[in-house]
Amino acid sequence: MKKVPLDMIHTQAGARMAPFGGWKMPIQYNSGILEEHRHTREQVSIFDCSHMGQFRVRGRKAAQDLDNLFPRRASTQKNNSCRYNFLLTSHGTICDDLIIYRVSDDEFYIVVNAGTIDSDAEYIRSHLSPTTKLSDESRDTAKLDVQGPRSGDVIIKSGVPADKIPRYFNFIHHEICGVQCIVSRTGYTGELGFEIYFDATAAEKLWNYFTGQTEVKPAGLGARDTLRLEMGYPLYGHELNRDTTPVEAGFGSLLNLDHNFVGRDAQLVTPSKNLVAIQFTDRRAAREGAQILDNAGNHIGKVTSGSFSPSLGCAIAMGYVQNGLDKVGNTVEVSAGTKHITGRIVSVPFYKNGTCRQ
Amino acid sequence: MKKFTEEHEWVEVNGELATIGITSHAAQELGDMTFVELPDVGTEFAQGDVLSVVESVKAASDVYSPLSGTVRESNSKLEENPEIINASPEEDGWICKLSNFNPDELIPLMTEGEYADFIV
C-alpha cells in the first residue's frame, strides 16, 4: 500500500489509518468524524489529499487534443480557471471525474482520483498529438485542502493578498512559507475552500504551518465523505464508474454536446437510470448496495453512498433509480439490515448553507 | 459481576437484572455513534441472538445478546443521543436490561482481565 509523505505525521497526530484507492490514508483523528465534520462547517479543516494525481499537459495543440477527448471543452477555459470534467470510455461511461486547470494557452494541469492515476495517464496520452506531452507529477506533488467558512482568512494570513484570492473555480500561483504553490478556490466540502498543490518535499512544512493556525484542525477522509455527501457531490467508484454516464449522473446540462469527444454518442440517448438524492426521516442509514423500492415494493434501484448526515441529523443517501421514477418528492423505501427505512427523493445539495460560492 | 464476550459486549448482573452494552474497546473502534436500534421491551432473546444494531458514521454493527432472557428495559436516551455510547460505553451507554436469564450462561464469558488480554 502506498504512503503519503505525511504518513508519520498523521500517525503521530493520532489518526486512524485505512486503505483508500491503494493508499494508506487518515480516516479520522482523535476528535472523531462528527467533530471534524462540524469544525469544517463552522471553522477550517485541513485534509491531506496527497494521494490524488496531477498531470501537466503541454503543447501548442494541447487545448485541441483535450477538446477531442473531454465532454466539456478545455479550449474555452480562461487561463487560471478550473473546470470539472469527465474522462469517458468509447462507450461514454466514466473512467474518472477530474478537474482541468488552464495554466496558459498551451499548458493544462489535470487533477485526478488516486485509484485511476496510471490508467488515466495512459488513456489520455493515447489521445494526444505527438507534439502534446503529458507528464505525471503525482508522485512529486503534495495536496492539502484547506476548507471551511474561515479558510479565506487563513489563506490571507499565509501571505496571499486579499485582492488575489481566486474566485470560485479559479486558481493562482503563490508562495506560502517560501514554497511555490498552486492555490485553487475549489473543494469537496461545500464550504469556502482552497486546494493547494506543491512539491511533496515541503509537505511537512506546510502541514505544520496550517495546523498551527488557531482556526485550523486536521480532518480525515471520513469527514470528507460525509461533507461531500451532504452536498450531493459524487464520489468515483460509488456514484461514478465505468457503468454510468455523466448524463445518468445528472451532469448532462454541463456537457458541450455541440462538439465531438470520446463517448459522445452515449450522452445523446435517454438514460435508463438517474442519480437521485434520498433524505430519510430517521437516523438509521442506508448503505452502499442497498435496494431502493417504490411504494408498491418494486425494486427500482440501488444505493451508491449512504450515511448519517451530521448537519441535518438524519440519514441521507444517493443512488440510481430507473428513469422516470426519479422525481423530487417521490417516497421510496430502502433496505437497511433486516428493516426498510422510508425516505423522500430531494434536490441536492442536502445541506443548503454551504459557503463555497461566497 | 461484569463479564465480557468475544463480540465485545459487556453484561453486568445486579439481582434479577442483567445490564448489557458494548465495551469501551468496541465503542472506540466503531467511532462516533449515529444510531442505535433498541430491542423492544418484552422480547425474548437466546444467547447469541442479535439484540441491537449500533451504527457509526462508517458502518452498522450487530450487538449479540450475551445471555438468554427477556428485555425488561431499553435505554431510550440512546434514540436521540447515541453519542452517549461513545462518552460512557460501560455505564450511561447501556443498551438494555434482561430478566429471566440463566446465570450458568455467564460462566464461560470472560472476566475483565481476560477481556483485556483478548483485545491486545
Image: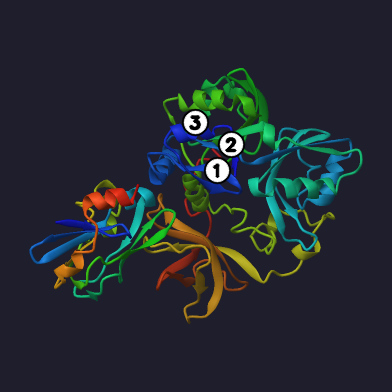
The answer for how far apart the CA atoms under marks 3 and 2 are is 10 Å
Residue appearing at x 53%, y 35% in the figure: A7
* Residue topped by disc 3: A9
| Pick the front one: A180 or B110 | B110
Q: Provide residue B67's location: percent of width, then percent of height.
A: 22, 68
Q: Which of the two labelled residues, at mark 1 and mark 3, occupies the earlier sequence position?
A: 3
Residue found at the far top of this picture: A178
Which image quadrant: the N terminus of chain A?
A: top right
| Left or right: where A344 falls relative to A139 | left
Q: Which amino acid does label 2 sit on?
A: Val
Q: Provide residue B66's location: percent of width, then percent of height.
A: 25, 65
Q: What residue type is labelled 3?
A: Ile
Chain containing the residue with disc 2 = A
| Pick the front one: A277 or A340 | A340
Quadrant housing residue A105: top right
Residue B48 in view in this figure: yes
| Left or right: where A72 falls relative to A321 | right
The answer for how far apart the CA atoms under marks 1 and 2 are is 7 Å
Chain containing the residue with disc 3 = A
* Residue topped by disc 1: A24
Residue appearing at x 61%, y 38% in the figure: A168
Chain containing the residue with disc 1 = A
* Residue topped by disc 2: A4
Quadrant housing residue B9: bottom left
| Left or right: where B14 falls relative to B79 | left
Quadrant housing residue B42: bottom left
| Left or right: where B78 falls relative to A21 | left
Residue appearing at x 64%, y 60% in the figure: A249
Q: Which of the two labelled residues, at mark 3 and mark 2, occupies the earlier sequence position?
A: 2
CB-based contact (under 8 Å), mark 1 and mark 2: yes
Q: Which of the two labelled residues, at mark 1 and mark 2, occupies the earlier sequence position?
A: 2
Q: In this view, does A33 lie above or below B5?
A: above
